[in-house]
Image (tube, rainbow, N blue to C red):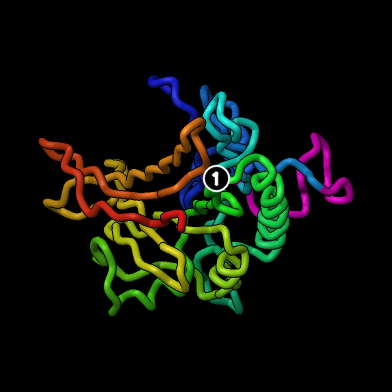
């Protein structure tokens, strides 16, 4: 906010443990300076709307998508070149009498499939705009807090970064990975929750990355600098105009004396 930069947020599993519930929190966040966050998505199907034109038949608060448009003055200035999906992974649930962490529900995945399908329709528009090399569908990134159960499969596999603590996730597997794979446009997903994990690993062609726990208000690892994950999307360029996203990369910035940059990697490149 001090820098005047647009920003977006999703809720973790502790944020509602004070005086505001999750709906109130997301509403408050959406009204803050420069925030582009949303309490829930705008209705695309009139049969699912409630007051204010918002979808009411969706679990959680903070489910929304943001379109990043092409460079001003370019042929893609009015077209999305990168889509950002935000989901509420909840807090705590009780399943068959046993307490577990929250998970992304089918209502959220149904909404996500509908949104992604709508973006696939840009394909023909993009081909009409230019004969230059363009991604048939804009790449997408996902953001939510609690990891999916499949991330445990990476424990004995090669990852970029550190796997310092056990994965704390739900006992329920709601099919999030299968949904992302079926969409085809999601190239990487980012989450938090396990503060001391800060790696990226690949499952079924999609990168899943921890943020790394950058705040000083919660637990960390003694003698280990706090760190923030940075994501960079780079535009391609033709002879006449900026084009769509051609590369997405990431690295971590450490809060040390040199603000060290580590574990730089490419998550996706246009083929």
**Observer-nearest of 63 and 248:** 248
Q: Is residue 78 above or below residue 253?
A: above
Total residue callouts? 1
Nearest the eye: 145 or 209: 209
Q: Is residue 222 left or right of residue 72?
A: left
Tell me: residue 109, above or below residue 119.
below
Q: Position of residue 5 (x, y in %)?
A: 44, 25
In the displayed structure image, the side of residue 192 where residue 163 appears, left or right = left
Q: Which residue does the image show at 45% across and 41% down from the upper left? A: 236
Name which residue lies at 19% across and 40% down. Answer: 255
Q: Quadrant of the N terminus?
A: top left
The front one of 253 and 243 is 243
The residue that mark 1 highlights is 132
Magenta highlight: main SS: loop
Looking at the rendered structure, the secondary structure element under dot 1 is loop
Q: Is residue 24 visible?
A: no
- Using the image as rendered, state which of residue 256 and residue 68 is in the foreground: 68
x, y (%) of residue 35?
A: 53, 29
Quadrant of residue 74 in the image? top right
| Left or right side of 219 for 150 | right
Q: From the top left corner, tell me how far across and down residue 108 is, in percent.
A: 67, 58
Residue drawn at (24%, 43%), measured in percent from left and top? 253
- The 10 Å Cα crowd at callout 1, few under 14, some 14 to 19, many 20 or more, is few
Q: Quadrant of residue 30?
A: top right
Residue 224 appears in the rendering? yes
Please name the residue shown 71% across and 50% down the image: 124
* Location of residue 233 in the rendering, given as x and y in whole percent from the top left corner: 42, 43
Which residues, given as a range, are shown in magenta?
45-62
| Residue 90 within the magenta-colored segment of the rendering | no
């Amino acid at each position: 906010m001090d820098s005047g930069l647009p920003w977006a947020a999703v809720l973790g599993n502790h944020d509602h443990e004070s005086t505001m519930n999750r709906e109130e929190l997301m509403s408050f966040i959406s009204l803050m300076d420069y925030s582009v966050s949303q309490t829930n998505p705008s209705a695309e199907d009139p049969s699912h709307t409630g007051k204010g034109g918002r979808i009411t038949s969706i679990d959680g608060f903070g489910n929304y998508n943001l379109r990043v448009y092409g460079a001003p003055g370019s042929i893609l200035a009015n077209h999305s070149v990168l889509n950002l999906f935000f989901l509420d992974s909840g807090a705590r649930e009780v399943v068959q009498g046993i307490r577990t962490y929250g998970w992304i529900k089918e209502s959220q995945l149904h909404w996500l499939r509908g949104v992604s399908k709508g973006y696939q329709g840009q394909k023909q528009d993009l081909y009409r705009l230019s004969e230059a090399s363009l991604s048939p569908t804009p790449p997408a990134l996902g953001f939510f807090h609690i990891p999916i159960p499949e991330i445990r499969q990476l424990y004995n596999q090669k990852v970029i970064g550190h796997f310092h603590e056990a994965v704390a996730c739900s006992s329920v597997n709601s099919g999030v990975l299968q949904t992302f794979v079926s969409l085809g446009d999601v190239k990487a997903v980012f989450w938090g929750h396990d503060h001391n994990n800060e790696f990226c690993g690949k499952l079924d062609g999609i990168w899943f990355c921890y943020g790394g726990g950058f705040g000083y208000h919660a637990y960390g690892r003694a003698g280990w600098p706090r760190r923030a994950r940075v994501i960079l999307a780079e535009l391609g360029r033709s002879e006449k105009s900026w084009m769509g996203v051609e590369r997405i990369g990431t690295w971590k910035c450490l809060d040390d004396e040199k603000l060290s940059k580590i574990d730089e990697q490419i998550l996706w490149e246009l083929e």
